[in-house]
Amino acid sequence: MSRVIPILSAQQAKTGSLTDIADRPRLSALPPLSVYVHVPWCVRKCPYCDFNSHEQPTVLPEARYLDALQADLEQALPDIWGRQVHTVFIGGGTPSLLSAAGVERLMALLRSHLNLWPDAEVTLEANPGTAEAERFMAYAASGVNRISLGIQSFADDKLQALGRVHDAAQARAAIVMAQRAVPRVNLDLMFALPGQTLAQCEQDAREALSFGTEHLSMYQLTFEPNTVFAKYPPAVPDDELAFDMQELIVALAQDSGLERYEVSAFSKTGARARHNMNYWEFGDYLGIGPGAHGKISFHDRIERQARQRSPDSWMQSALARNGSHVSERRQLATSELAFEFMLNALRLKQGVGASLYTERCGVPLASMNKALLLATKRGLLLENPMRLQATELGWRFLNELQALFL
């Protein structure tokens, strides 16, 4: 098959960079828009977690948090005015620490301030603890239609090693309650846990799939900087055993009718996480709440935004309504767009249509021609002018493939 990936013009190649026409993005249409809401508190901080989560105070400042969330959203409206919102993700932290009334107020706030799509996917992350699970029906009545459960394992000793506050019995009960409450349930599972054997990993995967699971996310335990596990690392399976565990989970999920559509995600037909798909397809998302990140496109630029990380500082600043709760607002340089786009798109098993790059980034595909040719030559990217898709080799060595676009 001949290579027909577009080549830079002589004028563009003359200085080794794009000409003025691509120095700034020119988006003819704005991408789909999602909203991410961050709830920063947990019952207890897990030793492997590097998210912006904080142990809950004795009394959760729910009312003040929701007041600040409203102030944050209202100050963000000029950036997204008139745009429809296709998905909402309430993450954390542990959003299921919010009371039923709190989630109802949150959903009312979103509906009153945003142009929510009639069939918008609204996901809430939840802890399988009994107290939180009892609220699932009330969450559903408020408009939540997808629950993502952080199961991680069905073995009590592994849950204890991970610092989780639930046990296996609570995990099983929470799955049943979630499936009764909402149409879609995601299960999160971890592997390569401290002391875990291949047989124990298989038992976890089989049990997760036994519930008729429509969506499964799997994550290898890693030691992230500034976590307890990074400072005091437990003994975990070596890379070879961890790879065997991953391959086993992939095989079991596929045998259960789940397609691996993204590096860490499996789903049955029609059950993909639409919110995450928008991330991977380089859509836009407004992030509100402490530490929340966002990506907002305009017709002539693409911005990355971030909120203050400290819950108390963010609440105080958001309520002051002077914009200080936004800690970062940075315009992406044209030179950054190829990596930003491919970092997400190549996570998808089927990749994306080649035209999506220009559509979402506002610059010609030719702007990353050199990296495309190199990736194709190394056998990491398919020689398909219509798609940007990793080969099997490229997907296995995804970090190396993505790095070519830096």
Image (cartoon, rainbow, N blue to C red):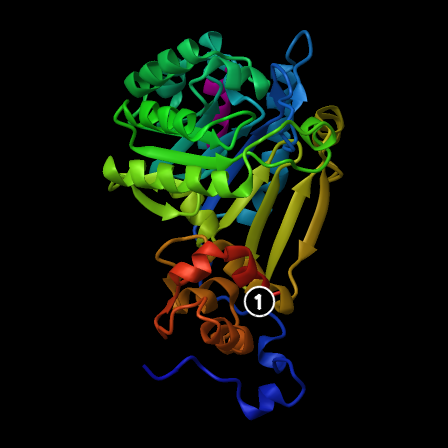
Instruction: Provide the residue span drawn in magenta.
Output: 102-110
- In front of the other: 272 or 160: 160
Identify the image quadrant of residue 63: top right
Residue visible at 64% across and 90% down? 14
Tell me, yes or no, if residue 272 can be seen here.
no
Q: Main secondary structure of the magenta part?
A: helix
Tell me, yes or no, if residue 248 can be seen here.
yes
Is 265 displayed left or right of 109 in the figure? Answer: left
Q: Residues within 10 Å of mark 1 (few under 14, many from 20)?
A: some
Image x and y of residue 104, in percent: 45, 19
Is 205 displayed left or right of 270 in the figure? Answer: right
Image x and y of residue 1, in percent: 32, 81
Image x and y of residue 184, in percent: 32, 29
Instruction: Report which residue position mark 1 lands on.
Output: 404
- Magenta stretch contains residue 150: no
Residue visible at 43% across and 37% down? 245
